[in-house]
Image: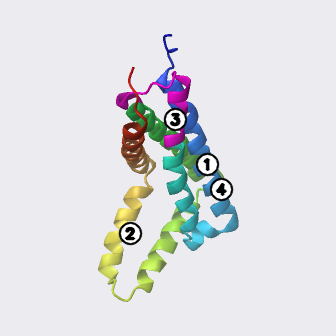
Amino acid sequence: MEPKKLTLGKFAMNYGIILGLIMILISVITYVTGMALEGVQWPNWIYYVVFPIIILYAISQFKKQNLNILSLSQALKIGVLIGIFSAIVIMIYSMIFNYLIDPEFMGQMMEVARDKMLENPKMTEEVVEQSMKFVEMFSNPAISGAFMIAMSAIFGLIYSLIGGLIMKREE
């Protein structure tokens, strides 16, 4: 029996959208509750746990729907594409949020970051200024979007490599 041809792109896009929506949900919750401006980081850890889980689950579902056949290259493509699609979803939301919903939010976040740095007695004013230039650079949507896509693709590659090595089964 020949396995039915599944399109990796569409398969990965569905899981990438789900992963992106989870990140948006976390972002909305932290914004509404004020945790974002307080610098609370633990909600972001949810994303770091969910990211590999979704990639590994997607790879296992692809294998299941492909008559239990999975090559390493298929697993890698799935993981990288999920990472890229999720980053694109998050990037679109971020642009809508930063330009339409709350244009002042990024400035507020930068002010909070500056205040947190100044609380550290070891940081001089010069170090804070250099750090703030770096923060400003990453507040640019094009730069932060490209960085987010690249990092999501890299982590998608890492997790899918692990999952693919564990789950691969050739014909």
Are circles 1 and 2 on residues that touch, CB within 8 Å?
Answer: no
Q: Nearer the viewer, mark 1 or mark 3?
A: 3
* For residue 153, side relative to residue 6 (left or right): left
Crowd tier of the residue under label 4, counting other residues whose Cα lies within 10 Å: few below 14, some 14–19, many 20 or above = some
Question: Circle 1 is placed at which residue position?
Answer: 22
Marks 1 and 2 sit apart, C-alpha to C-alpha, by 29 Å
Q: Earlier in the sequence, mark 1 or mark 2?
A: 1
Residue 79 as seen in the image, left or right of residue 31: left
Spatial CA span between label 4 and label 3 = 30 Å
How far is mark 1 from mark 4, CA to CA? Answer: 10 Å
Give the crowd class for mark 1: few <14, some 14-19, many >=20 residues within 10 Å.
some
Looking at the picture, which amino acid does disc 3 mark?
A: Ser
Give the residue pinned by disc 3.
Answer: 60
Q: Main secondary structure of the magenta part?
A: helix
Q: Residue at x 58, y 32 (%)?
A: 14
Q: Is residue 61 above or below residue 128?
A: above
Front tag of 1 and 4: 1
- Residue projecting furthest to the bottom: 121
State the mark number for residue 28: 4
Which quarter of the figure is the C terminus placed in?
A: top left
Question: Which residue corresponds to the image point at 53% horizontal and 61% vertical from the top-left?
Answer: 45
- Pointer 2: what residue? 132
